Image (spheres, coloured by chain):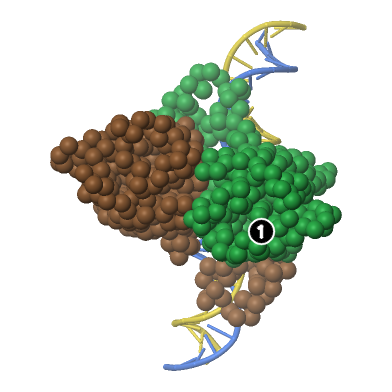
Chain colours: A brown, B green, C yellow, D blue
Amino acid sequence: MGTPSIKEVARQAGVSVGTVSNFLNRPAIVAPATRQRVQASIDALGFVRNEAARHLRAGKSRTVGLVVLDVTNPFFTDLAEGAEALAYEHDTVVMLCNSKTDPVREGHHLDQLEQQRVMGILITPFDSTDPRLTALVDRGTPVVLVDRTADRGLCSVSVDDQLGGRLAGNHLIEAGHRRIAFIGGPFTMQQVADRKDGITAVVAEADDVELQYHEVDVMGVVEGRAIGEQIAALPARSRPTAAFLANDLLALGFLQGMAVAGLRVPRDMAIVGYDDIDFARAAAVPLSSVRQPAELLGRSAMELLQEEVESAERHRHRQVIFQPDLIVRESSDFKRRR
Amino acid sequence: MGTPSIKEVARQAGVSVGTVSNFLNRPAIVAPATRQRVQASIDALGFVRNEAARHLRAGKSRTVGLVVLDVTNPFFTDLAEGAEALAYEHDTVVMLCNSKTDPVREGHHLDQLEQQRVMGILITPFDSTDPRLTALVDRGTPVVLVDRTADRGLCSVSVDDQLGGRLAGNHLIEAGHRRIAFIGGPFTMQQVADRKDGITAVVAEADDVELQYHEVDVMGVVEGRAIGEQIAALPARSRPTAAFLANDLLALGFLQGMAVAGLRVPRDMAIVGYDDIDFARAAAVPLSSVRQPAELLGRSAMELLQEEVESAERHRHRQVIFQPDLIVRESSDFKRRR
DNA sequence: CGGCTGGATTTTGACGATTCAATTCCCGGG
DNA sequence: CCCGGGAATTGAATCGTCAAAATCCAGCCG
């Protein structure tokens, strides 16, 4: 009835279960004739290995949990792509979980993953100081923070977000902008805060530049558009001439808001986004953006995890930090006269 | 060292493993005093249930696989949302897999899910006639097709795509368009083919209307923009005045292409998309779109699966079909004089 | 011809949670 | 004082796979 087990395969083939197990795991030590019989029996019965039993027996799982803040954001799917590629090479499976920037959902996913005794968890946490995370690690599930720098005893893979903010800020200041908006949120998220700090720092170093902050709850297209329309409605005298947005979805929405309000980009409003997702290049006005190596991030995170799992005891936690690049496109390519 | 098992909890609490198991599964039959001791022991040791062992013993899993064509498409994440919501009520977990419209990846995911003996699989298949799928079912894994109508012995949840095509077609014809483009692909995908057939049928019924077909490999923003620019470059005499695109990502890209080429929407080009994702409403020119009840689709699919799993033998496969709605917004709101 | 070697195969417990039949315990009725 | 009976608890068997240890056997050498 149910899927046949190794036992039935053995009976069919007239061998013991041990031989079938050997066939599956160490085919070299099984005599060719036997090998054939076992293979035939497997085919005939449609045998499929039971991962749960393997897992129980082996004491370790072959799946890795990946918890991201927003699956609809291409940045995260690119990241997942990279993680999955490496996982594939190590014959492991990635379980993709979407926390939707909600700590409750995140917690639920972590619980489930722990019950499944996943081999490890890669996560872009809502709050990296969450005691849950360390508790998880204490109980034996390796965790690697992604897109977030770990302070204490954890591995992490991240991008220098402060630098990203500085790059964007410098670029806009050099282009002559004197009133700039920073848009993102929630500001409690470390990534966002760092980008904000970065641009804040360079603005402080420059003379006579004003920086406005606008906080949003969720960084999506819809929110970007709303805040765009809101800013466009300001009188030209007080309206910023440039905006730096903490991710590209937000920036794309913002761009749409400008179009609706009839403001020209980049002449009336320069825009710089973050992540450099594919859509950014394809936007109505190609979007300048701070590029993060999303796929590489995912790949490296998985690498650290594999390393941690394999070397076990003598593993030392590492914090890998990549450098972002500013990609200048049409949306900010306009020299403003002072 | 490793996570403690039920056995250690039992020893700590001075009871047998049976009692701990009872505590976990039927707390009512455990004496209050014992209950407290067990709880204390669990807390002290940080015990976490081992899902693999439960699964092995119970013979059935508590996770469901959901394989979609494109996780970055909000239509599919909304769908996943619906499926997950119902799964949550049934205390099951959803494993989200992205096939990226690639049969090889799809196959790999199916293999993994089968090895995990998932309780069932919800899938938007690349090709619904794939013998893999029926083989899976024969070997005992229930499968529900999503966004695709099953012909043979399978449950499915879908939307009447022909009707969707007709709605879009009628709307454009009534608005006075006489040269219309249908854009989507690959045409071998049933959903796309049905939408195409729908609009083809109403065009055939109307007098004097020309329908052009444009096929794309992948339905994403980038592709939409490319084909938009290509069509915009046609001489006005032969250029279509309206386009119906087989999904909203394509339509959003197409819209961008129009903006780049300087064509006005809807005056020079009316656009109707498909899926009615959130971005559609928020686009620079709010997008008309054929709405599919994505979340409901996911929810219903999960419902059918749960039903199939529970009733087992006496289950009859069902094909649920929803009706799409045309949502008219600015992108097609323009009466063309004959 | 006996002992030995090494390759091929089988046997035998685990792994952790669950279930169910069996056992213990305790109280009240006869 | 004994026994029935219900509540609480126990212990063993089980799920499918794997690896270590044990067994088997053919062939070879002395």
Q: In this view, does A104 lie above or below B164?
A: above
Alpha-carbon neighbours of circle 1 within 10 Å: few (<14), some, or many (≥20)? many
Q: Where is residue A202 in the image (x, y as percent from the top left)?
A: 19, 43
Q: Residue at x 60, y 35 (%)?
A: B85
Residue in front for this viewpoint, B69 or A156: B69
* Disc 1 residue type (three-letter): Pro
**Residue B112 screen position, x and y as percent:** 58, 58
Q: Residue furthest front?
A: B337
Residue tagged 1: B240
Residue B316 located left or right of residue A65? right
Disc 1 is placed on an element classified as loop
Of residue B127 and residue A26, the one placed in the foreground of this image is: B127
**Left or right of A224 on screen, residue B233:** right
Quarter of the view holding residue B104: bottom right
Q: Which residue is drawn at 22% across and 49% down?
A: A174
Residue placed most toward the observer, A218 or D18: A218
* Residue under the image location 37 percent in, 51 percent down: A331
Residue B105, position in %: x, y?
57, 62
Which chain contains the residue that carries disc 1?
A: B
Q: Is residue A307 visible?
A: yes
| Residue B249 visible (yes or no) | no
Q: Position of residue B161 (x, y in %)?
A: 74, 50
The residue drawn where x is 73% and y is 64% is B131
Asked where in the image residue A291 lies, by quadrant, the reply is bottom left
| Front residue of C14 and A127 | A127
Quadrant housing the N terminus of chain B = top left
Number of labels in the image equals 1
Image quadrant where residue A148 sits = top left
